[in-house]
Amino acid sequence: MKAVSKSFFPLFLITALAALSGCNGQGASPQATGEVGDQRQDAPPSVQTPTPSTDNQATTTGVPTPDPVPSPVAVIDPPPTIDPTPTVSPTPTLGASCVSSDPNHQCIGLKMVSYENTAGETVLSLDQAKTVIQGVNDLWKVCDIAFQIDEYVSVDPTQSGLLYGTGASSDTTKIRQTYSNNTTFLVVATGPWNLNYIAWTQLPGAGPYGVVVDADYSDKPVTVGHEIGHYMGLDDLRSSLGNIMYYIVYDTDTAITTSQCSTSRSTNLNYWKAMMRQ
Ligand SMILES: [Zn+2]
């Protein structure tokens, strides 16, 4: 698991033209957080060494801010104990379940968060979320890894003091603190950023964890599948066009090697046991 626990350097990914170096290992200090950033496909080809360190909030290593606790509603009036609500309801699976009897199969639960704009329109509908995860599963099935949506929420980010669009790209730690939990992978689709970056993902090693992705890319299976690859400890690849972890995410970047399968699967066992469903 060495490859996983180390290498906290920001990487960038460009999704289109033969742009260059999205990846920036050099500027990263050893103390950098394990956050990997990815660039949009139409990034200018001259982006040589962006300064990702600005997005690596040093505060990540501080004491995590607890999720805002909803102010307790007056408890003066306890509900009559006559009909106890059955609390048996297990976490509902939204969309297809990936649970299997195959002991080798890895099934991971996801929490999908979709931001709403001021008009109340959500950036990634539940149907879109199901579709994109279906696409992600098609990519990762070669590793016998699959994902299911355990929770989907559409939220007004401003109610949690979060920014909807561009600002979300530099607020990733707070976003993760707000929406992450210890039992699911987190994927947050924010409003559009209109920046070169399209997504940030925290590598295993230091939380809070989660994929934070620009709305314009949140429905793209290769983008989401790539970010989840980071979640499972994979780094960007700079010379393997066609691989899912290629730093430029083309729709045709779908290959996953045996070695990447092996890394991902052992990362899941070592870090994400609580996220795995059986
Ligand atoms: Zn990447």
Image (cartoon, helix red, strand yellow):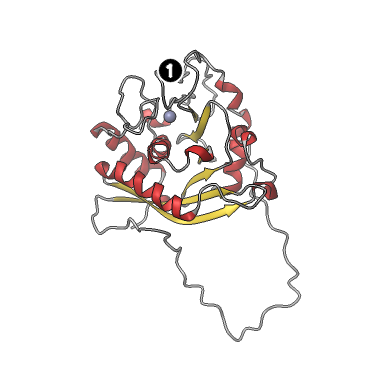
10 in relation to 211, above or below = above
The residue tagged 1 is 19
Q: Which residue is drawn at 37% across and 28% down?
A: 3
On-image quarter of the C terminus: bottom left
The image quadrant where one finds ligand 1 is top left
Q: Which percent across, then down, holds residue 241?
A: 31, 24
Whether residue 110 is visible: no
72 in relation to 155, above or below = below
Q: Which percent across, then down, holds residue 28?
A: 52, 19
Q: In this view, does 42 lie to the left or right of 191?
A: left
On-image quarter of the N terminus: top left
Name the quadrant containing residue 4. top left
Q: How crowded is mark 1: few (under 14 residues within 10 Å), some or many (20 or more)?
A: some
Q: Which percent across, then down, holds residue 50?
A: 54, 17
Q: Which residue is drawn at 53% across and 37% down?
A: 214
> Label 1's element?
loop
Q: Is residue 119 left or right of residue 95?
A: right
145 in relation to 92, above or below = above
Mark 1 close to ligand 1, CB under 8 Å: no
